Image: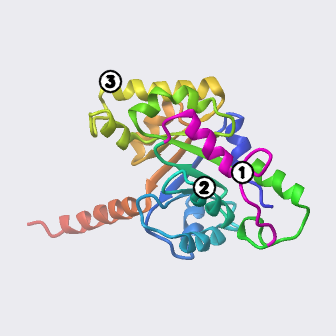
Amino acid sequence: MRPNPLKPRLAAGGCAFGTMTFEFFTPGYPAICREAGAEFILYDMEHSGTGFETMKTQFACCRGLDLIPFLRVPSGDYHFIARALDIGAMGIMVPMVETPEQAKAIVDCTRYPPAGRRGAAFNVAAHDDYSGGAETDKIASANARTMVIALVETAKGIENVDAIAAVDGVDVVWLGHYDLTNFMGIPGEFENPRFHAAVDRLVQACSRHGKTPGFLAGNAKSASDFRSKGFRMIAYGVDTLLMQTALADGIGLLRSTTAP
């Protein structure tokens, strides 16, 4: 089975940089992202309305590109998590993680017995490239490569972030900054001291338990700021906003040439 080099790198204290995708699902899209330097694509199913068949095609397009596909599933239900992995995702992000019990249940869905409760579909699914081989080897490889990203984005999640980060099998604790400010009653107030305190609490929890803090950076400033705070897995930009911003800059430049 194809390995996931980002998992051991992050576990050893390294970094991984990629992007997040909501809308652009053409065959060439993964190659475009890889050529830009992305090491992973974090695809979204929570807000995009995208289905598993579309995701299966995208994961296939990532093969051979040294590009790791991750998927934010709509919820922590078993049928979302296990299906995402079976169609080729090398890791899953689950939204609204608020307790260690919830985090443990998510991890269980990603691991084969006896470590968890993931159902087996070997030789007939995309996750093992439809290949033969010993089931014991495939189980070990799948458990080793699969990443679990717990998205902490509520006040309750921050209260419990140390216990969430302590759960064995959670690899990344991702800061959901927009939703967090909403749940804290300070929507969009990213300079609020309460928000900064929550960010620090998440980073400190990751440091204590050897986990990776993750973040979605909307621009160069936020990418730089959150790298300096200790975030080591960062998705730079969302496909739609990256295109929109670049196009707006170009159109604005052209319009400035016609100003009287």
Check disc 1 and report its element: helix, strand or loop.
Answer: loop
Give percent across and percent down for residue 131: 83, 71
Q: How many marks?
A: 3
Q: Are marks 1 and 2 in contact (CB under 8 Å)?
A: yes
- Badge 1 crowding class, 10 Å Cα cut-off, few under 14, some 14 to 19, many 20 or more, is some
Distance from disc 1 to disc 2, alpha carbons, whole Å, reads 9 Å
Residue position marked by numbered label 3 in the rendering: 193
Range of the magenta residues? 97-123
Which quadrant of the figure contains the N terminus?
bottom right
Disc 3/disc 2 C-alpha distance (Å): 37 Å
Q: Residue drawn at (68%, 64%), measured in percent from left and top?
A: 86
The residue at the point 64 percent across, 27 percent down is 209
As for residue 80 lying within the magenta part, the answer is no
Name the kind of residue labelled 3 in the image. Pro
Q: Mark 1 points at which residue?
A: 117
Circle 2: is it few (<14), some (14-19), or many (20+) Cα within 10 Å?
Answer: some
Find residue 159 and report its horizontal and vertical position in percent: 45, 26
Q: Nearer the viewer, mark 3 or mark 1?
A: 1
Residue 78's disc is 2
Query: Which element carries disc 3, helix, strand or loop?
Result: helix
Decide if residue 164 is on the left or right side of residue 14. left
Q: Which residue is drawn at 33% across and 59% down?
A: 245
Quadrant of the image occupied by residue 103: top right
Q: On screen, 239 above or below 144?
A: below
Magenta-drawn stretch contains 106: yes
Residue projecting furthest to the left: 260
Seen at 19% across and 68% down, the residue is 255
Q: Nearer the viewer, residue 189 or 93?
A: 93
- Secondary structure under the numbered disc 2 in the rendered image: helix
